[in-house]
Image (spheres, rainbow, N blue to C red):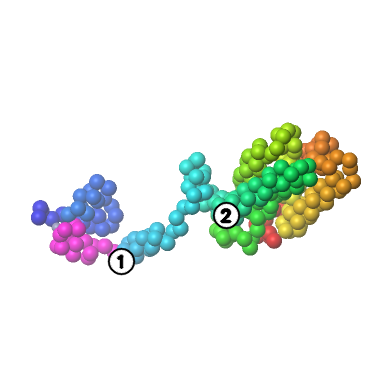
Amino acid sequence: MSTHVEPRMLEAYAAGDVDAAHAFSIEAHVVECADCQSTISQAVSPARLARVWSDVEDRLDAPRAGPVEAVLTRIGVPGHLARLLAATPSLTLSWLAAVIVVLACGVLLAQQGERGLLVFLCVAALLPLAGVAAAFGRGLDPVYELAVAAPLSSVRLLLIRAAAVLSVTIALAGAAALTLPGLGWSAAAWLLPSLGLTVTSLALCTYVAPLTAFGTVSTAWIAVVLFGALASQDRLAAFGMGAQATFVLLACCATVVLVLRHDHLELGRTL
Ligand SMILES: [Zn+2]
């Protein structure tokens, strides 16, 4: 065995005051030297030992990053935000898988004719809304407590989550729409209604509880689609030019309301 580590160095090591290079060489010696181990065990303060031990426990207990969180981190989303986003109920793999199944059924229906296409468009417009609604759901959210304690305002977190859910769901619905038979303008006809409905729901959330807001808007949407299909010659009346323009106007008005009243969106008040 080579010469022992100087007691002064051992003390500095025990106090955590040596650099990484010295620490490595001290550790290489100490693991094989009973004398130095005994010296160091007397030098380490119980408080530091407790702190190190609790760090070890924290690391062992920390949940591993899921695939969504890993992807978010890789594309440069900061760690705490990636965890909060990945824990959004409507950004989990199971939710996204459900969205894909619903869209696939919609595409199959759309192959059957105009009535099927109507169902696809109606559902494709509703899916982003459902995702954003779930992102608001207090009862559904495993990190609700964490979200409330996050170093972000809850309003900002909600809006970031809503934007993330909206973009992911719209991308999925867009991909599904590309497989529609006789690809035409109708493939994108759900997009503006979807944006209009989602922003309107968010604006409504500044007045009433989210469950009421999302429920009211979804019901109204289904009623409009059905009414359009039954009362007009054009079965897709709810997706025609007039309707599209109305949804753009609705989205603009709702955005203004949301900007003016965003302080009324409170995570603690949801559902
Ligand atoms: Zn030694």
Main SS of residues in magenta: helix
Reading the image, the residue beneath label 1 is 46
Residue 27 versus residue 165: which sits nearer the camera?
Answer: 165
Task: Determine crowd level at label 1: few under 14, some 14-19, many 20+ residues with C-alpha closer than 10 A.
Answer: few
Find the magenta span and give its range.
Answer: 30-46
Residue at left 65%, top 55%? 134
- The answer, for residue 1, to whether it is visible in the render is yes
* Front position in the image: 136 or 109: 109
Q: Give coordinates of residue 212: x percent, y percent.
A: 76, 58
Q: Residue at x 30, y 66 (%)?
A: 46
Q: Does 184 sit above or below residue 141? A: above
Rendering coords of residue 139 (x, y %): 63, 63
- Residue receiving disc 2: 94
In the image, what residue occupies the spot 16% across and 58% down?
32
The three-letter amino acid code for the residue at tag 1 is Pro
Question: Label 2 is placed on what type of residue?
Answer: Ser
Instruction: Say left or right for 151 vs 155.
Output: left
Q: Classify residue 34 by image quadrant.
A: bottom left
Q: Is residue 51 above or below residue 252?
A: below
Residue 43 magenta: yes
Q: Is residue 180 left or right of residue 228?
A: left
Residue 108: x and y in percent read 68, 46
Expressed as whole percent of the image width and height from the top left, the position of residue 150 reads 55, 54
Q: Quadrant of the N terminus?
A: bottom left
Identify the residue at horizontal 76%, vertical 52% (top origin): 218
* Mark 2–mark 1 distance (CA, rounded to whole Å): 46 Å
Mark before the other along the chain sequence, 2 or 1: 1
How many C-alpha atoms fall within 10 Å of the one at disc 2: few (<14), some, or many (≥20)? few
Question: Looking at this view, is 206 or 133 the one in front?
Answer: 133
